[in-house]
Image (cartoon, grey):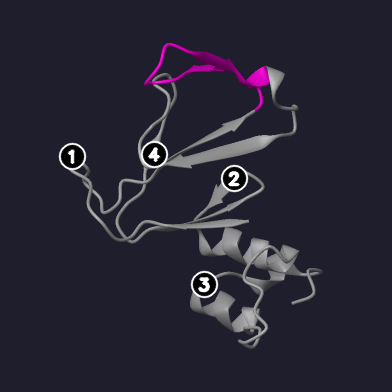
Amino acid sequence: TLWVYSWPGKRPGSKVWNGLHYTTREAPFTTSHLSDVDCTVDFKLHTDRDDCVSVIATKPLTDDEEWIEMKRGELIVFDQGRPNFSPKSLFELELLGHGLNSTVLERPALEEDMRLFNLDPSVFRGACI
């Protein structure tokens, strides 16, 4: 699990603070051409069909795939290669044990947090919350 937070600093030409970009690749994997050198990488040679990979960089590294620029103050949690934004997907990660684990803070009452974000706790029955 990787937590990515877009803050602070300002890069010339960027509309956001630090200009973090990401792209997510999953099957079927294809080739991708690097922006700064004439080189193409065939991801089929380096991945399995069940893989999902996200790459996070300060600028897009390839010129033939979609890169998403993070907004100022945006927090994205990448788990098993996939970006997670919504409260529902973040609760699911927490229930899997992939969220925040703290030995200092008490574990939150997830049902109370779910109500705060208008999530139906019955959707998560059997998840031991």
SS at mark 3 in the image: loop
Looking at the image, which residue is at 80% across and 74% down? 128
Is 20 above or below relative to 35?
below
Pick whichever of labels 4 and 2 is earlier in the sequence.
4
Q: Position of residue 103 (x, y in %)?
A: 68, 83
* Sequence order check, earlier mark of 4 and 3: 4
Residue assigned mark 3: 118
Dot label at residue 13: 1
**Above or below for 40 versus 93:** above
Taking the image as shown, residue 49 lies to the left or right of residue 26, namely right
Other-residue count near label 4 (Cα within 10 Å), few / some / many at <14 / 14–19 / ≥20: some
The answer to which image quadrant residue 121 occupies is bottom right
* Contact check, label 1 and label 2, Cβ < 8 Å: no
Asked whether the residues under the numbered discs 3 and 1 touch, taking CB atoms below 8 Å apart as contact, a structural biologist would say no
* Mark toward the start of the polypeptide (2 vs 3): 2
Disc 4 target residue: 68
Which numbered tag is attached to residue 82?
2
What is the secondary structure assignment of the residue under circle 1?
loop
Q: Is residue 78 magenta?
A: no
The CA span between labels 4 and 3 is 28 Å
Q: Which one is in front in this view, the residue at disc 4 or the one at disc 3?
A: 4
Closer to us: 120 or 101: 101
Which comes sooner in the sequence, label 4 or label 1? 1
Query: Gap in Å between the C-alphas at discs 2 and 3?
Result: 23 Å
